[in-house]
Image (cartoon, helix red, strand yellow):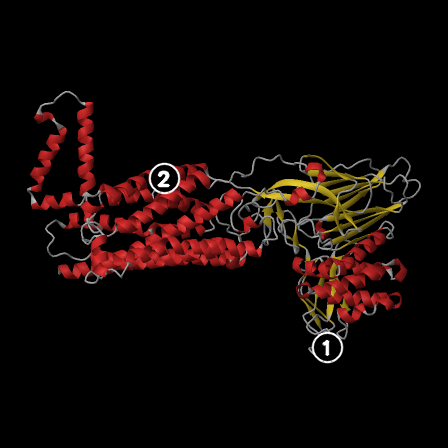
Amino acid sequence: MASSCACDLRMLVAVVYGLLTTVVLGLGIWRVVVQINEGTSTSSSTDPIGFCQNSGTFQNGRCICPEEWIGLRCTIINFCENSTHINFTFPRIPVGRYGSSMEKCEKETPNAGNPKATRLCNFTDKGEIKLQEVVIGNCSVNLGTLEMQIDDISNKSDSISRDAQVLTSDTNKLTPNNITAATRVVGQIFNTSRNATLQAKEVAVTTVSQLLEASEESFRIAAAAADATFTTLVDQMKNYSLSLENKSVVTPNVVVESVKFSSEKRMGSTGVRFTVQKGASSSLVSSPTSVDTNADDIKPSDQTELQIWLDTTHSNSCGFIIYQNSKLFQSKIFTPHPDFTQRVISGATDQDKNDQSVRMAFRNQSIEGFKFHSFACVYWSFSVNDWATNGCFAEEGTGNFLRCSCNHTTNFAVLMSFKKDYKYPEPLNTLSMVGCALSITGLILTIIFQIVTRKFRKTSVTWVLVSLCMSMLIFNLLFVFGIENSNKNSKDTDTPVSSNNEISNLNNNVPRNPACTVMAALLHYFLLVTFTWTGLSATQLYFLLIRTMKPLPRRFILYASLIGWGIPAIVVAMTVGIIFLKNRNDTKWELYYREEEICWLAGREKGAMESPLVWSFILPVTIILISNVVLFIIITVKVLWKNNQNLTSTKKISSLKKVLSTLSIAVVFGITWILAYLMLIENADFMLFFSYIFCLFNTTQGLQIFILHTVRTRIFQSEAAKVLKSLSSATRPVKWPPSATPLRLRVRMYNMLRSWPILNEHFRLLEPSIITEETTLSETDQANTSN
């Protein structure tokens, strides 16, 4: 019966440990994979439950709706329903966009796979949403053949412009070659010498809008092959903006506005102010624009997104263009933040002069997890095909706006740089530091005790345990004194001005700190060493406790030392070397290895193979933890919780002893580190909770080792009693009667209780039962046996 109960208990322990380990590790690995595939970007604000409808997100106190919906809560329809016309079927189309037909050109045609037709969904003059006529493309023409028809634009501008719009309607299929060819075609449509019709030019604006939805990488490749093509298009569009005569063309990614003055309206007017208001979505179709022809300066309001003022004292007309992003302006000297949409505005007059006054106001942007750092007011220089600052000046910002002024007209933008906004819960920092301080103290005492008392204890785990404690001690010291980056972001002002309006300062907002990189490498190394020694500890105990009839492998200590201290060094060296060789041309290559705010491995959302935190730390640590958990279960079931028929103590006392022994091995094996995988849960409350639990268990790991592997030994208790006795005698010079001496009383009680066999077992519980008592071979003995 007793054997059956013991078997059931062992099975229960094995099942519980197995299930917990599988769930925790599985959850952690799953979360890592999900974050790699989907990224970890979240909305910038918490959406009040049920407020924003139809996939709208709550940002900056309002709902940002998808293009298909508008309104305060994204509940007003802003699309045309599915439709069928002339054998063409169209899905739902947002207002202001051309929808592609479901029917595609046949495989044998030059335009195979592209839609046969498109259809515009737009507002009527009465403000009603209505589908326009179907535009049928030519399946025998592709962008390559269309580019060869540029010379016929004067005669075929409408058909060429229409075909270009249809061929670029499926933006997911736009390649760098497609972008280059389409840019050349529409650039010539805007060319005044080609005499294209106004209708062709208006359709060409739609083509440009569609092109701006292609990937940034495709534009970068296209610009490298034919940079002047984009410059020509931008220049021709500026001329087009001056020819509309008080008309506007609005598309999702491009807005063109023209203002022509009459002699009456120019009386007393010094300039024209063009304003772009906040929209319900990211589409420019939902962003209202307004023109004030009698303005003396910029005057942004709470609803203003962007504003520009031109001095038109000596001009008869002016034109404005808004580009939703800067993909047509591929810069070689500035790289914007990938999550930041850089709008570009063009302002021009028919009498452009070098001393013409221009003033602008750009709303300060925000990015989740980052804070605004600096900005520069720039214009696109056609002579160098890049951003320049000549004649432009950054002004002191007020409120939520960045203000710029220039002395000429062209395409303007404000380049912004951001710093990560690092926020740390102070109680968590305090808990980490206190736990590390306790661990450092415990580890020092454990190392000293293990070395000094090795011969008396006659155990074979000294070297492995000392190596584990030494690596853990060094890591804790480095963590406490070195993990904080000396370049940690200071509190910037809300709208700082870039020094001298220099673009170079924007790219170098993170000062280099080689010392932090070295510290990150040391932390990386010693934490890997710590985990490696936990694995070696598990392996050694497996040989000593499970394969008790066989000696340790030959030269086990030598090989263990080479593995424990050598393998992590190889991993760290390879990691730093690979990252440096891959990014050596980047002055900020260090940030591909370490974080900016702390001296620790970078956990970037670029995929597993480009995240050193994943492939050079989490992956090897996961392998070690899995093996440690397996050995832990085997040792727990077969040794610690094995039924001992010779045990004279009660079941309660025996269970306590087994629990203490189990905890002793769990601490050395680093089992509690599996809690780190629970911190990958994306719920903020759960993550914070498990962060506290993780810090509590793992920052005090050194203290736990000290208590379970040092304090519980007979030698330590005996020596501690001597120290306490000497201290007691030193602080109490008066000789007390023997009957009143507390120490002597405890000795008498101890001798009395030892005469009781059952209670004697209780006192033996204060000693490490399995690690220091049941492994009787010393390191010297093991070495002699192995030889």
The nearer-to-camera label among 1 and 2 is 2
User: Could you classify mark 1 by the number of other residues whose Cα lies within 10 Å: few (under 14), some (14-19), or many (20 or more)?
Assistant: few
Q: Position of residue 439 (x, y in %)?
A: 34, 41
82 to the left or right of 434 = right
Q: Is residue 476 above or below residue 227?
A: above
- Quadrant of the rendered structure where residue 102 is? bottom right
**Disc on the earlier residue, 1 or 2:** 1
Number of numbered discs:
2
Residue at the bottom extreme? 108
Residue at image position (77%, 51%) is 384
Q: Position of residue 624 (x, y in %)?
A: 36, 57
The residue under label 1 is 109
Residue at image position (11%, 22%) is 736
The residue under label 2 is 435
- Quadrant of the rendered structure where residue 474 is? top left
Q: Position of residue 714 (x, y in %)?
A: 18, 42
Residue at the top extreme? 734
Q: Quadrant of the N terminus?
A: bottom left
| Residue 9 seen by the camera | no
Of residue 171 and residue 337, the one placed in the foreground of this image is 337
Disc 1 marks a residue whose amino acid type is Thr
102 to the left or right of 11 = right
Q: Is residue 549 above or below residue 434?
A: below
Disc 2 marks a residue whose amino acid type is Gly
Q: Quadrant of the C terminus?
A: bottom left
Of residue 365 and residue 530, the one placed in the foreground of this image is 530
Q: Is residue 421 above or below residue 186?
A: above
Q: Are marks 1 and 2 in contact (CB under 8 Å)?
A: no
Q: In terms of secondary structure, where does tag 2 sit?
A: helix
